[in-house]
Amino acid sequence: AAGGEARAAVPEEVVAAVWPLHLVDWKDREQFEALYAMLGRLPQVVEWHLDRQAMPITMRFQPQRLSASGQELGGDLVFRRRLGFSGTPSSLLPVEFNPCQFERGDDGRILSTLTSPAVASLDLLPAGWSVRAVLDRVARADPPYHALIDTGALVTGMDNLAVATYLLRTGLRGFDACVFLDARDRKMALLRVGLSVVRLEQCGAPLGRRFTFYDQTHTTGMDIRQHYAARAAVTLGKDMTFRDLAQGAYRMRGIGKGQTIALFAPPEVAKLVHTERVVNAGGAPDKVAELREGSNAADLEDVAGWLLVNGMRSERTQADMLVCQNVANVWRKGAYRRLMRMEDQQLLAQGRPSKQLSLQLGAWKDETDTAVSNRVEAASGLEKTLRKRVETMKRLGLLVASDKEDMAKEVEAILQREFGQARPKDAAEGDSSVQLEGEQVQEQEQEQEQEQEQEVEMEVQKEETRVEAAAVGQDYSKEVAALQPFRLRQLAERPALDRQGGYPCAELAVKTSRGTSGALPFPSFLLASRNYYDPKWSTRALRRLKNVVVLLEWVPSAERLALSTEERELGKAAEEEIDRVFGMFDLDQSGTLERKEVVQVLRALDVDVSEGNGALLAGLLDGDGDGVVTKEELRHGLRRQGVYNIQDGRYFVLVSLREAQDLRSS
């Protein structure tokens, strides 16, 4: 019954077009769409897909995993002497490291700078904002921004080149290039003229006419010179900390010394800052003001305070993780040193890992617990969890008798140092559980999944413009067609099917399983030889379209050559692009462009303009000859094929390889 219902929903003509299953080619999209409509909801098919495909792939897991951390490099496990340097220092270090030496006054200077109304301001994004709305706000700002620093990761679904292209096409008046980082972390520049990409050092645009886009990945540790009075837009995200803001803002190396920033705050971030304000005010929302746009010291300080609180929460979780790593590092060091002292015969037993080897490797093994309890477990304190792990290591024999006393004291010293005094309640009871390290891994996996989703979004955008190149699996005719000859002297005559065998590509159509395909609107100068594809085949058997290997340029008479007067519709997207480019060059808003400006417009629209024909093309566009070009004259002129150096009397013909061989030999 289910199969009958599924089949009844499919039109009969679609059912009739489906090939027998053993003949179906998996590359044939039409056949598969019809099969899916017929069979996709059958319970038997769904069950087979789940049991044989989905579940075996998605439910794979290992009962154990080997884990490691920065302790192996930061501690004295491998290297006896270590030296560390960081531009963003922290006290969360392995036990073997000496305390971090902070530069006195640095944090205070950074906080003072980023909360100064003379340096920073707030720009609140509207409700329902989108990625393109953020880019539009930056590209059309007045006074202009010189950089977009996406610390809040608001720009998603677009790669850096796409962002740079969108910014230049949307606005950025007064800028000649947009600098960005490519997939190989190279500093690249997208030039406005021709939208060509070059290395930054080859850009040539002065600092004042150069815009820079820092994606979220490159808001740390990336130096690109900026104009001394540059103004940057810095985005805020819900998971940011003050360290993230400082890292991004100080991409402007002259901040506070002429360079300024504007903080882009989405409504979600503004709400979080307001909530923090309410908490600090004792829980009276009606008495707490909302964030305001502009350079208000109190608002900037509250944003910085909210970011600092976020950083404290993040560092509390990191500190708990560090305690777990410090404790585990004690028995891991002992296991590592015992492994290094073991002889080969102790490592292997009859070609397999010995019990001693497996025991020592157990110091790096973590159990993967996939069980789901049917009741809510009481939260376990971090100290209690760690002491249980210590007892487990003792039972496994990883705290052996010769090392037991020293190692046990070292573990106890770590626990006493961490838990010897009262801890904040939320830190002791909230996240501290036996799953702490698992949660950290889960957060990393979620971040990776988000990155993969963004990559998928970009791939979907690319797929929308990608032409499917795979041949459709059909029962194509393999009949070899006879060559259709013509006389060479006929090449001096105008093209015609009954003379040279050429016909317009706009008439080229092919037979498909559902009839004859519609023709495509190719230009009139593009022809096809019937030896390449005979028009009669479009109503007969299915035939493959051959790849175009040879394109013949054909001029029947050089005396009859002239710039084409043919006009072709531009399409809505092209019309909008012309309007945008015209507006970018019409700086005085007069609605007209001088002829020298028209040459730059044509280059921006990817029209081939050489040194010799620029003035000629500008003259062609100036329909009334008054020396200036209006937007309507530009549109009308770009519809004419002559602007693109297309000539009446010059043709390009798709020919077969045999035909090209005979023409060459003659």
Image (cartoon, grey):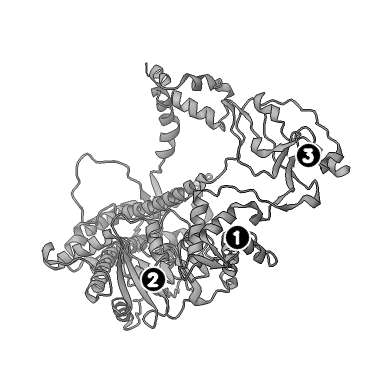
Residue 579 image position (x, y, % from top left): 49, 58
Camera-near label (3 vs 2) is 2
Secondary structure beneath disc 1?
A: helix
Rate crowding at label 2 as few (under 14), some (14 to 19) or many (20 or more) other CA atoms within 10 Å. Answer: few
The answer to whether residue 359 shows anywhere in this view is no
- Mark closer to the chain start, 2 or 1: 2
Q: Quadrant of the C terminus?
A: top right
The answer to whether residue 145 shows anywhere in this view is yes
Where does label 2 land, which residue? 142
Query: Is 647 rendered above or below residue 61?
Result: below
Where does label 1 land, which residue? 621
Where does label 3 land, which residue? 657
Label 3 and label 2: CA atoms lie apart by 59 Å
Rate crowding at label 1 as few (under 14), some (14 to 19) or many (20 or more) other CA atoms within 10 Å. Answer: many
Label 2 and label 1: CA atoms lie apart by 32 Å
In-front residue for pair 255/553? 553
